[in-house]
Image: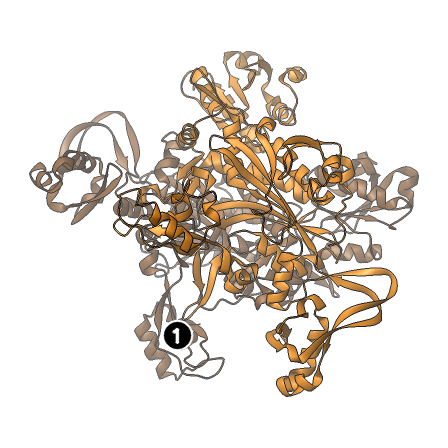
Chain colours: A orange, B brown
Amino acid sequence: MQMDPQELLSLCKRRGFLWPAYDIYGAVSGLYDYGPLGAALKNNIENQWRRLYVLQEGFYEISCPVVAPEPVFKASGHVDAFCDVYVECTSCGETYRADHLAAGMHPNPASLGEHELGKLLKANGVKCVECKGELTEPKRFNLMFKTSIGAGKGKTAYLRPETAQGMFVNFAQVYRYGRERLPFGAVQVGRAFRNEISPRQGLIRLREFSMMEAELFVHPEDKTWPGFRKVKDRAMPLVPSKGDPRTIRLDEAVKAKVIGNEVLAYYMWLTYKFALDIGLDPARLRFRQHEKTEMAHYASDCWDLEAETGYGWIELVGVADRGCYDVQAHIDHSGADLTAFERFDEPKEVEQDVVKPDFGELGPLFKGKAKKVAEALSRLSPESAKGKDKVMVEVDGEKVSVPAKCFEVSRRKEKVSGRKIVPHVIEPSYGVDRMMFALLDHAYSKKDDYVTLRLKPLVAPIKVGVFPLMPKDGLDEIAQGIYNDLTGAGFDSYLDDSGSIGRRYARMDEVGTPWCVTVDYDTKNDGTVTVRDRDTAEQTRIKKEKVPKAIEALVKGAGLSSLNTLR
Amino acid sequence: MQMDPQELLSLCKRRGFLWPAYDIYGAVSGLYDYGPLGAALKNNIENQWRRLYVLQEGFYEISCPVVAPEPVFKASGHVDAFCDVYVECTSCGETYRADHLAAGMHPNPASLGEHELGKLLKANGVKCVECKGELTEPKRFNLMFKTSIGAGKGKTAYLRPETAQGMFVNFAQVYRYGRERLPFGAVQVGRAFRNEISPRQGLIRLREFSMMEAELFVHPEDKTWPGFRKVKDRAMPLVPSKGDPRTIRLDEAVKAKVIGNEVLAYYMWLTYKFALDIGLDPARLRFRQHEKTEMAHYASDCWDLEAETGYGWIELVGVADRGCYDVQAHIDHSGADLTAFERFDEPKEVEQDVVKPDFGELGPLFKGKAKKVAEALSRLSPESAKGKDKVMVEVDGEKVSVPAKCFEVSRRKEKVSGRKIVPHVIEPSYGVDRMMFALLDHAYSKKDDYVTLRLKPLVAPIKVGVFPLMPKDGLDEIAQGIYNDLTGAGFDSYLDDSGSIGRRYARMDEVGTPWCVTVDYDTKNDGTVTVRDRDTAEQTRIKKEKVPKAIEALVKGAGLSSLNTLR
C-alpha cells in the first residue's frame, strides 16, 4: 500500500515513537527525538544487527568518539569534497540547496559546480520560495559540523559524517587484536552528523542520525569467500546498472559479473537477510547498482539496498567494494604503517620495490635523528613513497616530513618471508533511522480507520500488553504480578487498566504489540488468562504462571495453538 | 590493592579494551576509542542498567540528539555558567586550568574568579610548566563544544554536556506518553561532551564520554516512595556532610534526616545495588554527601557514589534532589506548559494565585492576537509569572514576550477540580566510562606477574574461551562447532588455537573471561570437553552438546559442580 508519510509521522508523534527535537524552542529541522517506543525499536534493530555481525560473523565492535581532529577528514577527503552548494535569500535569510532549486532546468543539476548553477538559476529567474526575495550567488558549504577542541587557539575538529573513519584509523590496532590475520572486520554502531542545508522528509534526511557500519578488510587479490557456497543458490532482486532488473541467484550474479565478487555478493545477501529478519517487505526491497558516474572514483562496485516507501524508493544500506582507497589515504597522510603482512609458505626470491634511504641527504637534514628517520623510511610500503615529493614518517612519536631527495624507490631482488599488503575494504553501511522509517512504513496497515502496525516480535518495542479486565477485585494485583514476571524475564511489557478491552487492544495494535494478556474473573477461579494474537485476533487461555514461558515460545516463532500444553 | 593506574591502562591498550583516539595523527588528549573488549564491556554495563531502570523500575527510555540549539543551554544555565578559568603560555601556547596551577596557594582555588586567580598566580610567580614561558591573564572558557546548524548565518548550537536536558525539554511529551500520571521517570543512555582545558587521568576526565541518566519526576510535596519499604532495612556506607562516616540502614538515614527523603534514599540504594551487581568491590565504595558550598544552589540534597581506585576516591554517580529547578527554568525560557495536573478527589473551593490578563493593555499591544495571548497567559502557572517583568507565551507556534503590565497575579477563591504543579526531579546520573575504569581497577588482580581480571560473568566481554588442544585431527572442527553453538546462543566467545593451553588460559584470564572449554583427544572418544573456571581453576568434564546450556547456568550463578548432570 502506497501511503502518505505524513499519516505515519503523525502516528509516530502521537504514540511516542518520535518527536521533533527541541519543540518547545521552535524545533530544528533535521533533528528528532526518539520517544520510548522509537528508542526501544531502535535498540531492538541495533541488537539484532549485532547478533548477526558480531556474534555470527565475528566482526569486532569498536566505539570511537564522534569528535575528530581535522587531519582525519583531510585524509578521508571530507574537508575538501564533502560539500553542497547553497544560495541564501537576501531578504528573509532562508537557505536552499542550489541543485534542488535547479530541478528540471538541467538533466543532472547535482553534477554542476557553483558557477554553472548560478548561471542556470539566474537564466531561469529563480527567486526565494518563501518570500520571492533575491538570492545570493551560489556558495559551497561543507556539510560537516565544525567545532574546536581545547581552550585558547584550540584545534579545528569536526563531528564525524560517518563512523567508518574510526575503523580505518584504528586498522593497525584491530589487526593486532585479531592476531594479525586477514580477512577480519570491524563494526561500529553510533551517531553521525551532516549539517544539511535544508533537510525535509522526516527521518529520511537528518542532521544527526545513527549508523551501523561494517568494514571488512580482505586480501586485495582474493575476493572469494568461504561462506559464499552456503548462500550461492539464494536469489535477490537486483537492478544492475546494465541490463534489466531481475531476481537472480548469487552464483549466477557473480559468474555473469553482475556483482563484482563473492565477498560483495555474500554481504549483499547478509544485508538482504537482515532486512527480511527485522520485517521489511520483500516485495518492496531491491538492490540497485550505482552507475559509474554515481560511484566514488575509487570504488569498484557499489549496491544500495532500497525500500519502497511513501517517499518512493529510498536507500537504506550501501554495500561497496572500496578497494584500498581508505586505508591508503590514511597511510599517505599519517605515515603510519597500516598494512597487513602476508607470510609466504616458504621464503621466496622476489624482485620488488623497496624504499632505500639516502644517508648523504638524511644526515645534514635530520642530524641525530637521521638513523631513526632512515629506519622509518625502510618500513614504508613502496606504494606510499613511489612518485611522492615528500613522505610523512613517525619518529619518537612525532610526525616528520621527509623530502624525496632523501630516499629512492628501486627494484631489488631479495629473499623475503612475506610482503606487506594494503587491504581492500568491503563496506556494508546501514542507516538506522531510514531502516526504522521503512520498517514502520511496511508494517503500517489500515482497515476502516483501524490501524495495526504489523511489526515482527523481534523488533516490536512492546512485546506484551497486560490488562486486568477491571482495575479492582484483585484482578489488578494479578495483572501487576504477570507484568512483573514478564519484565523480570526481559520482555518489554505494558500494563493498561483503563477503557474497554477492545480499546486497549486497539492501543496495542496501533503500536505493534504482538500479544495481549487479559486477566478476568475466571482467572480468580481457574488461574488462567487469555492470550490474544495481534495479527490473527486468535485467542487462547493458559495458566497465568506460564505467561513468560509462552511469550518466550511465541517470540521464537511458535504459533498460538502450540500453547495448549500451557493450559 | 592500591594499584598504579598506568599498569591498568597499559593492559587495556595492549589487550584491546581502549586506545588513545586518532593515535596515527598524534592522538588528542581526553578522547579514547573502545576496542572490541571495551565496547563489549560498555554494552554489557549499559544493558544491565537498562534491565534495572527500564524493565524493573519502568522508566521510559528516550533518545535525543547530542547537537542542541543555544536556547536549550541558555535556559539550563550552561551558556552563562558552565565555565573553567584558563591561562595560556605566551611562548609555547600550552593551556592550563588556572585553579589547578594555583593548587596549594589557596584553600579552595576552584572557588576563585578569574581576577583573583590572576593575582594569586602572579604573586606566586607561576610560569608555564612545559617551557617556563610567561602566562596570559586568566580567562573564562565555556566547556561546551560550540558549533553551528545550517548554511549561511546558521544557528549557534552546542554539543550537550549532559543528557539530562533532553528529558526536561520533553517533559510534556513523556508525561503524555505515560498517560499523565505522576510520578514517572525518563532515562537516556548516550554520549555527552565537555571541552576540558587540559584533560589528563585516562578515563576519569574525558572530552567525550557516555552517561546513563535517569530523571524521576515526582510530586513536589510527596517524596515518600512505595518501593522504599522493601529496602528500608538495607545498609550503605555513607559519608554525610555533618557527622561521622558510617554504614547505616536506609530507614534510619531518612528518619535522622541524613538522607533528605525516601525517594532519594531508594535511588541511592538502587545505584549501590547496581554497582554491586556489575562487580564493584563493596569495600571500596561509599556515598559522599555534597557540602552545602559544593551543591548547586537549587539542589536540596546530593550524594556521590564514589569508588576507591588508583587515582584515589573518584565520583561514579551523582544522585540528587534537584527540586523544580530544571523544569521551571524551561517553563520560564520557553513559555511552554511543563506542568503536571493534580486532580483532587473532589472539586474544592480554594484560594489560589491566578494569572489575570489585562485586556486594556493587551489590546493595543497585540491587536488581533490579544485574545489568544490572554488565553495563553491564563494557562501559565502563577509561579512562572509572579514578580517577573515579562513572561514568554506561545501563540500559534510563535513565542511572544508579554510585559508585566499586561497581567496581574492575584489571589482568588474558586472551585477547582485540581491544580497544575511543577514536578520535582530526582536524578541519578551515571558516568559510564568512570564506572568501567573503576570496575577494571577493582577486578585487576596480580600474583607473581600473573594477571587475572576478576570481572563478573554479567559484564565480562568474552564469556567463554574455546580451545582445541591441537589445531588438527578434527579437534579444530569440534571446537569450531562448539564456538558456533555458543555464539548462536548469544554468548560472546573466543576461539583460540595457538600456544600451550596454559598460555591460552592466561590470555583469557587477563581479559576477564570466566570460563574456558577445551577440546582434547578424549572428546573424540567420549564426546566430553573440559570446562575450567577462571577464579577457582577448578575443572569438570561435560558433554560437548551441553556447553551452551552449561554456560547459561553458570552465567545465572550456578557453580561448576552443578554441571554434573551435563556429563
In this orientation, does residue B243 appear?
yes
Q: Is residue A55 left or right of residue B93?
A: right
Report the side of A255 relative to A300 (left or right). Answer: right
A140 left or right, relative to A401: left
In the current view of this chain or complex, which residue is farthest to the left? B360
Name the subunit of mark 1: B
Q: Secondary structure at mark 1?
A: strand
- The residue nearer to you, when weighing A58 against B333, is A58
Can you give x and y, in whole percent of width and height, for residue A10 in the image?
40, 30
- Residue ID at (88%, 38%): B527
Determine if residue B160 is in view: no
Q: Residue at x 70, y 79 (%)?
A: A374
Residue B241 in percent (x, y) is at 40, 58
Q: Which residue is mark 1?
A: B87
The crowding category of the residue bearing disc 1, from other C-alpha atoms within 10 Å (few below 14, some 14 to 19, many at least 20), is many
Q: Position of residue A495 (x, y in %)?
A: 47, 26
Most foreground residue, B268 or B82: B82
Query: Is B292 rendered above or below residue B472?
Result: below
